[in-house]
Image: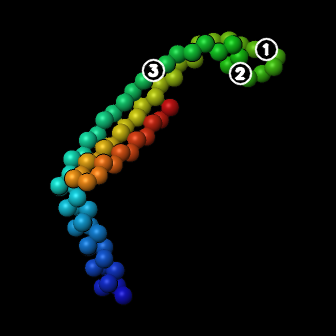
Amino acid sequence: MIMRSLLICSFIFLSVQSVWSESNVQMTSTASVSTAYDDNVTFLSRNEKDDFVTNLALGVDLTQEGRTHKLGVGAELV
């Protein structure tokens, strides 16, 4: 049973290596900054405070392109 599991894991590992070596993988990083006015930044019904809020978003996109397919994955941290 252990030998069978090792054989399956080895096959998967070699298949993944083969796919990565024959395909094109591209990584793109993204960044954005935005500013917005908020008339109630504390979310209180009394003692409302207004202010400008600045948001920073960072992200990464991975695209893997093969002969018969294209796979894209992206993530963003806001």
Q: Residue drawn 52% across and 16% down?
A: 35
Image quadrant where one finds the N terminus:
bottom left
- Tell me, yes or no, whether the two marked residues, 3 and 1, touch with CB atoms within 8 Å: no
Residue annotated with mark 2: 42
Q: Position of residue 21 (x, y in %)?
A: 17, 55
Amino acid type assigned to the residue bearing label 2 in the image: Thr
Residue annotated with mark 1: 47
Q: Quadrant of residue 76?
A: top left
Q: Position of residue 48 (x, y in %)?
A: 75, 14
SS class, disc 1 = loop
Between 52 and 25, the residue placed more toward the observer is 25
Q: Residue drawn 65% across and 15% down?
A: 38
SS class, disc 2 = loop
Q: Against 2, is 69 above or below?
A: above
Q: What label sits on residue 33 in the rendered view?
A: 3
Asked if residue 55 lies left or right of residue 62, the reply is right
Q: Upstream in the sequence, badge 2 or badge 1? A: 2
| Label 3 – label 1 distance at C-alpha | 28 Å
Q: Residue drawn 40% across and 35% down?
A: 59
Q: Residue furthest front?
A: 68
Which marked residue is nearer to the observer: mark 3 or mark 1? 3
- Tell me, yes or no, whether the two marked residues, 3 and 2, touch with CB atoms within 8 Å: no
Asked if residue 38 lies left or right of residue 27, the reply is right
Q: Position of residue 47 (x, y in %)?
A: 79, 14
Q: Upstream in the sequence, badge 3 or badge 2? A: 3
| Label 2 – label 1 distance at C-alpha | 9 Å
Amino acid type assigned to the residue bearing label 1 in the image: Asn
